Image (cartoon, grey):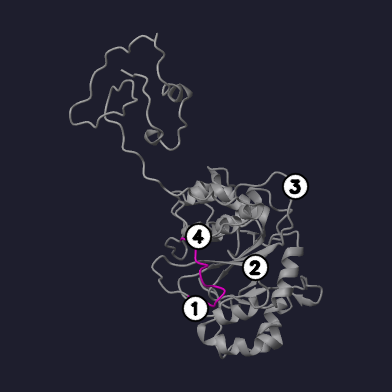
Amino acid sequence: MVCTASFHDSYLLPFLQPLPSLLRSRSPLPPHAPAPSPVTELPSQSPSPSPDTACVVGPPLPSPPSQQPTPSPPASLGFADFLAPSGGLMHNMTDEELFWRASMVPRVARVPWRIVPKVAFLFLVRGDLPLRPLWEKFFAGHEGLYSIYVHASPAYTGSPPADSVFYGRMIPSQNTSWGDMNLVHAERRLVATALLDLGNARFALLSETCIPLLSFPAAYAFLTGSNASFIDSFPTRARHVPFFTERNVSLAQWRKGSQWFEMDRPIAVELVAEERYMAVFRGDHGIGNMEEHYLPTLVTLLGWGARAANRTLTYVAWPRPGPHPATYGVRDVTAELLEGMRRGNGECGYGRAGGAVEFCFMFSRKFSRDALAKLLELAPKVMGFG
């Protein structure tokens, strides 16, 4: 049963306004008004109702709420709050949720805000960054023009010093292993995290053994001024089996290439949104090293040919047959070596960075930890920074 009752204002819940009928019921009844109907009394243990209560049926009335200070209204979000996530890079999203969020694309062509394009540097590493001091000199003085993202082993618990540009730049990661498709998952995880920042226009994948061969202004000018994505992709028959043909990946479409890419934002979005061929490449085909084929083959499968340069900007040398490229230590590092890498050792004269530096490759690998001191010494003279 529900009866109309007249309660004091203090008995009303703080988010309800007193009903007009309740407010009016406080005025005395006129002499000719009929007497109220009998009502059921509250149990003896219940508090006595207020004298002006007409009737009460049901459980005891709640205690008057304590007086709490009025909370301040939440701060209003501005347009800049939607351009990049705040509060660091760590999150609790699954890969599926991350890729879904990262694949969102604004449909209005005109941007109502001046966004300075940034280059996202994606470091796929196992743990420490032994060449970090060289990269810190590369980035020095160019804040706002780059973003850094690091995917390390989940078991890694180290951290760069708080004054480093790499501090706080690790993303949620999962285990990876050489020759496994989980390397591609890690690459997509890095790209997707970087896509959450709408200011990131170019994406470069690097390892802990990579070094820059150019200064930051030269690399930035070339990447942000290029219309091409640099994805190594060349025809091969290696590792193509009937499994792929049965799933509409023909030998004519099959490609191989280096995993170290430099791509623009539209292709980066397609990479994290792609699901059909990812399911094929991680299927039960029994073939390893698919990380050397997945992205290069997407160039033909998704029709990126007109937008991809079919080459990488990261130099690597294969002096002899085998699964691993050449590694450079302190005794190998010379000015001639670095200049030869940048120019492609005479194999290409691809372009100019910033309209001044002739180059073929922008980055190089693999350099060992003991090469750091020599690289720092040569950086001002050969690479143009430090």
Q: Which residues are magenta?
A: 160-172
Q: Note whether residue 33 is visible.
A: yes
Cβ–Cβ under 8 Å for marks 3 and 2: no
| Local SS, label 4 | helix
Q: Amino acid at mark 4?
A: Ala
- The residue that disc 4 covers is 186
| Mark 3 to mark 2 CA distance (whole Å) | 23 Å
Where residue 82 appears, as percent x and y from the top left, is 62, 52
- The residue that disc 1 covers is 161
User: Residue at 55% of width from left, 48% of height from top?
Assistant: 101
| Local SS, label 1 | loop
Tell us which disc is closer to us: 3 or 4.
Answer: 3
- Is 147 rendered above or below residue 58? below
| Mark 1 to mark 2 CA distance (whole Å) | 19 Å
Where residue 4 appears, as percent x and y from the top left, is 37, 20
Q: Quadrant of residue 308?
A: bottom right
Residue 109 tag number: 3
Tell us which disc is closer to us: 1 or 2.
Answer: 1
Q: Amino acid at mark 3?
A: Ala
Cβ–Cβ under 8 Å for marks 1 and 4: no
Where residue 186 appears, as percent x and y from the top left, is 50, 60
Q: Residues within 10 Å of mark 4 (few under 14, many from 20)?
A: many
Say which quadrant the C terminus sits in. Answer: bottom right
Q: Residues within 10 Å of mark 1 (few under 14, many from 20)?
A: few
- The residue that disc 2 covers is 146
Q: Is residue 165 located in the magenta-colored stretch of the structure? A: yes
Where residue 371 appears, as percent x and y from the top left, is 55, 86
Q: Is residue 35 located in the magenta-colored stretch of the structure? A: no
Precedes in sequence: disc 3 or disc 4: 3
Precedes in sequence: disc 2 or disc 4: 2
